[in-house]
Amino acid sequence: MLRIENVDIFYGQAQVAFGLSLAVRPGQFVGLFGRNGSGKSSVFRAIMGLAPPRVSGSIKFKGAEITRKPSFTISKLGVGWVPEDRKIFPNISVWRNLQLGEKSAKDLPRGQKLFGYDDAYRFFPKLREMRDKLGSQMSGGEQQMLTIARTMMGNPALLLLDEPTEGLAPNIAKDVLKMILKIRGDFNTTTIVVEQFSEELLRHLDYCYVMEMGEIIFSGKPHVLLNDEHLQRRLLGVG
């Protein structure tokens, strides 16, 4: 579904990623790990066609070249992005935020299960309670729930989750992760998640990559990373 080949990423003259190659098959749940500043979020910006950064190399989605295409075109093709800083609309209601994420069924593959308002409220009951409140009246955890639900309202073929638990209290982060896993279970959406490190998340992934200083330094099955504390320390500084 997604193939990145020999991609370099630049901000101005500064190169932040070097010769990246990775692949994601339909239905997979893939993790991209690394310390702060390793270049993980820049990979998502490159996939989404956001400027900056500047990108060279090849990024293909469903076999079509999307490198340097505008972000609205990439979104329309079926890529959904949950950014690290949430980017909800603070001055409109929760319901209106969800509505803005909605995608017409005519744009979806035939037979694909649709994610709608009932699903948003089922997975995130807090959103039902707050549906008439403004985005600015929500806590950080509630805003993250809204961002995930709004992105899913677009029924993406590929979902990009950029550090979805970053900055959340541990109990809220646990709830958000649980809901992400439930959505995955119900809709089997192909998903890439960027995180620093999470043992709980690793247990549910199909494949994982680790980045350091703009390069992929590990790729493999999650159990390899999960069961090797020495490897965790060397690659991620944890364990």
Image (cartoon, rainbow, N blue to C red):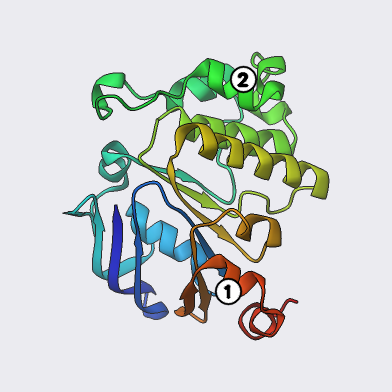
Q: Residues within 10 Å of mark 2 (few under 14, many from 20)?
A: some
Horizontal and vertical percent position of residue 189: 43, 40
Residue drawn 81% across the image and 50% down it: 170
Q: What x and y, as percent, mark residue 59?
A: 26, 62
How many other residues sit within 10 Å of disc 1, few (<14), some (14-19) or many (≥20)? some
Which amino acid type corresponds to the residue marked 1 in the rendered image? Answer: Val
Residue beneath disc 1: 224
**Callouts 1 and 2 close, C-beta under 8 Å:** no
Q: Secondary structure at mark 1?
A: helix
Residue 103's image quarter? top left
Q: Is residue 72 left or right of residue 221?
A: left
Sequence-wise first label, 1 or 2:
2
Residue 108 tag number: none
The amino acid beneath tag 2 is Tyr
Q: Residue at x 29, y 24 (%)?
A: 111
Left or right, 69 with reference to 198 = left
Dividing the picture into quadrants, the one containing residue 67 is: bottom left
The x and y percentages for residue 83 are 52, 48
Q: Which residue is mark 2?
A: 121
Quote the CA–CA distance across marks 1 and 2.
36 Å
Choose between 3 and 153: the one closer to the eye.
3
Question: Which quadrant of the rendered structure holds the C terminus?
Answer: bottom right
Compared with 230, 123 (above or below) is: above
User: Which of the two discs, 1 and 2, sits closer to the camera?
Assistant: 1
Q: Could you say where residue 24 lies in the image, as x and y percent from the top left?
A: 36, 58
Q: Is residue 34 visible?
A: no
Name the residue located 53 percent from the left edge and 24 percent from the top edge.
97
Note whether 2 is above or below 90 in the view shown.
below
